[in-house]
Image: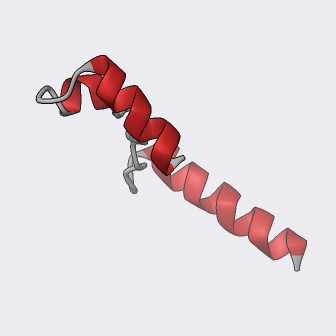
Amino acid sequence: MATDELAKKLERREKINEGVEEGTLKSTQVFNPYTEFKEFSRKQVQDFKKTFD
């Protein structure tokens, strides 16, 4: 069971290394509420974060 999973992962990695299959890139985008909601002051955003977190 675990060997099948490992074999599938290794097979996929080998295909990616050979260029047969393309790997997926992870998103590095970061959410910054201060720049996203420019209509609110930093204090207002902090108050909203306290309210909703």
**35 up-or-down from 37: above or below:** above
Q: In the image, is 11 to the left or to the right of 2? A: left
Front residue of this view, candidates 32 and 27: 32
**42 up-or-down from 5: above or below:** above
In the figure, residue 25 lies in which quadrant? top left
Indicate the position of residue 12 as horizontal and vertical percent values. Answer: 57, 59
Rendered residue at 45%/38% (across/down): 49
Rendered residue at 51%/38% (across/down): 50
Indicate the position of residue 17 as horizontal and vertical percent values. Answer: 50, 42
Tag count in the figure?
A: 0
Q: In the image, is 27 to the left or to the right of 37? A: right
Rendered residue at 40%/56% (across/down): 21
Rendered residue at 31%/28% (across/down): 44
Quadrant containing the N terminus is bottom right
Residue 32 visible, this angle = no
Q: In the image, is 8 to the left or to the right of 6? A: left
Color encoding of the figure = secondary structure
- Name the residue furthest bottom: 1
- Name the residue furthest top: 42
Indicate the position of residue 29 as horizontal and vertical percent values. Answer: 34, 33
Front residue of this view, candidates 2 and 17: 2
Q: In the image, is 40 to the left or to the right of 8? A: left
Residue 49 visible, this angle = yes
